[in-house]
Amino acid sequence: MKLYINRNPVMEIDLANDSLTRMKGLMFVKNIQKGLLIKPTNSIHTFFMKEAIDVIYIDKYSKIIKITPNMKPWKIGPIVWSARAVLELPIGTINKYRIKTGDSVEFL
């Protein structure tokens, strides 16, 4: 699946939408090259992560409502009550694509 932000292609992503894949996330992955869409969820942690990630929280309207660049391993992210999904992305993605709150997200 491909991630688009404001209709611009960003990167390939995988989907974590069952208990096992949502719980695992990107744990133990080195040299992260793809994003991971975790849904449904409104919070994440980075326990057992091998590297920092960029994090994007998405609401039910497919709008970005919170971003967390450079979330280090062994951290707990905030609970974002209006979030319906969270994107875990390779470090630097938010800056590279100038992603900001209010941007629209699509997956094709």
Image (cartoon, rainbow, N blue to C red):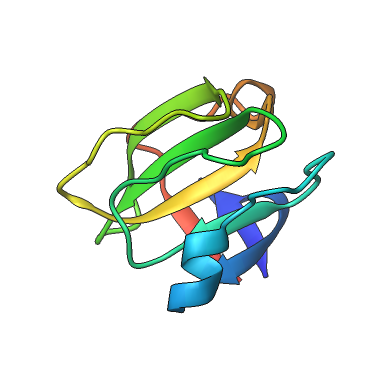
Q: Is residue 93 above or below residue 7?
A: above
* Quadrant of the rendering where the C terminus is positioned: bottom right
92 vs 79, left or right, is: right
Image coordinates for residue 71, horizontal then vertical, percent: 52, 25
Residue 17 seen in render = no
Which residue occupies 64% across, 30% down? 97
Seen as rendered, the residue at the extreme bottom is 18
Q: Could you tell me residue 18's position as x and y percent?
A: 46, 79
Left or right, 92 with respect to 74, comes to: right
> Compared to 5, does 24 lie above or below?
below
Looking at the figure, which quarter contains the N terminus? Answer: bottom right
Compare residues 56 and 79 and report the one nearer the observer.
79
Q: Is residue 27 above or below residue 66?
A: below
Residue 67 appearing in the image: yes
Q: Residue at x 50, y 49 (%)?
A: 87
Q: Residue at x 35, y 50 (%)?
A: 58
